[in-house]
Image (cartoon, helix red, strand yellow):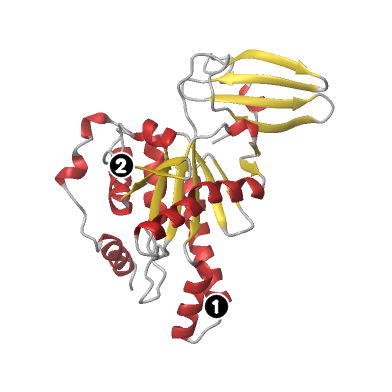
Amino acid sequence: MLRNPMDLLSDEVSSGLYNFYVTKHSGRITTSYLVSKTVAYEARYCNTAGFCTFCLTMENGGRGNMNHKTYLLLFDILGFAKMADEIASKNRMESRIVRAHFLEILKDKVNALEAKGQVAGKHYGESDDWLLALDSPDKVFQVISGILEHHTGYLDYQTIPLELAVGIAEFDTWASFSKGKLIVEDATIEFLKKHFFYRYHDWHKKHNKGQSIRSTYIITTESAQSEMANVGPENLDPIDHEGVRFFVADADRFQQRGRVFGFLNKIGHPGSRWYEGIDNLYVPPLEYPEIKRTLSVSAHAP
């Protein structure tokens, strides 16, 4: 979890776990950089107002020999308004109640993942979308798997269809952290959605006789796919559309790999390559989430 750099001075820095290695002065702003074995932090201080923001840096440029990447996960509910109306009509209830229920499910999922330390930062947008910052490729799989494992309670809509995009960006040019919260303009999220979601929707219609996407899908940018190739489930064929290249991943396969990384964490081998074939030895049944939920309910029954 990200912390105020001032909290690090007494123990980690003095014990050598972190080092201040660059300090820049520009007007009234002093910028210092912190380095650990796994992640570079940039702390900005205002000389008159004290601590301002805590930004996670993503590039090496003069900031030490770092290979750490920060992954951005953008996700949104697919066909939200229409689906809520359909469910409301079948269940004789107001669509706003359905929408609120779906949002609550996803918010609870994100909060639970954040509490486990799998989410470095988050931003909830005005259009019911989320932007999450993750610090390793295995966490990308775990977080997506965790988000997709849910149950709505509605018979014909047991899971919420989502559209998810994974990328790597120049984080500190348009986003920052403040007390653990990801600060980003909603206009930036809208740009990212147009850049990837809208393009994929358009590509899908052109290659599927005008049909819209109705089920959960995951797209990755070219840079993210390159970084995740060693831990990803498979090599994906690129899609080039309107000057943008991206990849579409199989959601079930993606979720399966996330479960594997979760298992490796539990046995004390997070991200271990020794067990990279474990998901090929055991494939959970499609009914796995429902079985898990049923067993959980039974275990707590009086």
Query: Position of 3 compared to 47: left or right?
Result: left
Residue 181 position by quadrant? top right
Against 142, is 60 above or below? above
Count the numbered circles shown: 2
Instruction: Tell me residue 198's x, y (percent).
Output: 50, 54
**At 29% from the left edge and 44% from the top edge, which residue is drawn?**
257
The amino acid sitting under disc 2 is Asp
- For the C terminus, the quadrant is bottom left
**At 47% from the left edge and 73% from the top edge, which residue is drawn?**
83
**At 54% from the left edge and 36% from the top edge, which residue is drawn?**
1
Residue 236 position by quadrant? top left
Dot 2 falls on a residue whose secondary structure is loop
**At 34% from the left edge and 67% from the top edge, which residue is drawn?**
300
Q: In front: 170, or 299? A: 170
The amino acid sitting under disc 1 is Ser
Task: Give the label on residue 237, or none.
Answer: 2
Report the residue that reaches farthest toward the right. 48
**Mark 1 = which residue?**
95
Query: Position of 127 compared to 52: left or right?
Result: left
